[in-house]
Amino acid sequence: MGQLYRKYTFLPYEDIRHKGSYFTNQLDELRSLSADMTAKITQELDKSEGQIIEKSERELRKLLKEHAMIVQNHMQLMNIMADKYHFHVNHMRTQPLTIYYKMRESLKPNP
C-alpha cells in the first residue's frame, strides 16, 4: 500500500495583525477624552478651596491614574490577542493531507 503526504494551502499568507488597531485607536481616544475631562474638572475645582475640594482633586487624580493603567493594559491585551488571532488564522490556512492507495500489479511481465 502506498502513501502520499502533502500540505494543501487554501489561502496565501496574510498579515492580519493590523485588525487590532481599530480597538487600540478607540482605547487611545477614550484615554484622551478622559484626560480632557479630568483637566476641565480640575480647572473648575482650582477656582475653589477647602477640604472637600482637595479630597475631590486627590480622588480624581487617583481615578485618572487607575483609568490610564486599565486602558494601557487593554491596549497591550489587544495587541497580544491580535497576534494570537493572526497566528490562528494563518495556521488554519493549510491542511495536512495523506492519501493512501493500493499499488496495482503491472499487466506486462517484467523482462
Image (spheres, rainbow, N blue to C red):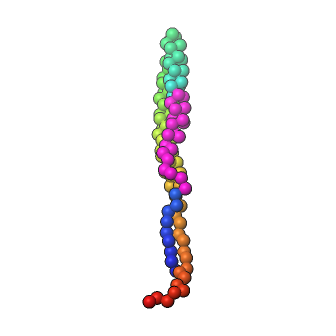
The answer to whether residue 16 is magenta is yes
The residue depicted at 55 percent of the width and 76 percent of the height is 101
**On screen, residue 107 above or below 87:** below
* Near-viewer residue (6 or 18): 6
The answer to whether residue 104 is magenta is no
Q: Quadrant of the C terminus?
A: bottom left
* Near-viewer residue (58 or 10): 10
Residue 60 picture location, percent across and down? 51, 24
**On screen, residue 9 above or below 100:** above
**Number of labelled discs?**
0
Residue 75 visible, this angle: yes
Residue 55 visible, this angle: no
Residue 27 picture location, percent across and down? 53, 32
The segment highlighted magenta reads: 10-30
The residue depicted at 55 percent of the width and 56 percent of the height is 10
Residue 99 picture location, percent across and down? 54, 71
Residue 24 picture location, percent across and down? 51, 35
| Furthest residue in direction left, as rendered | 111
**On screen, residue 10 above or below 34:** below
The residue depicted at 53 percent of the width and 55 percent of the height is 93
* Near-viewer residue (17 or 3): 3
The residue depicted at 53 percent of the width and 40 percent of the height is 19
Q: Predominant secondary structure in magenta?
A: helix
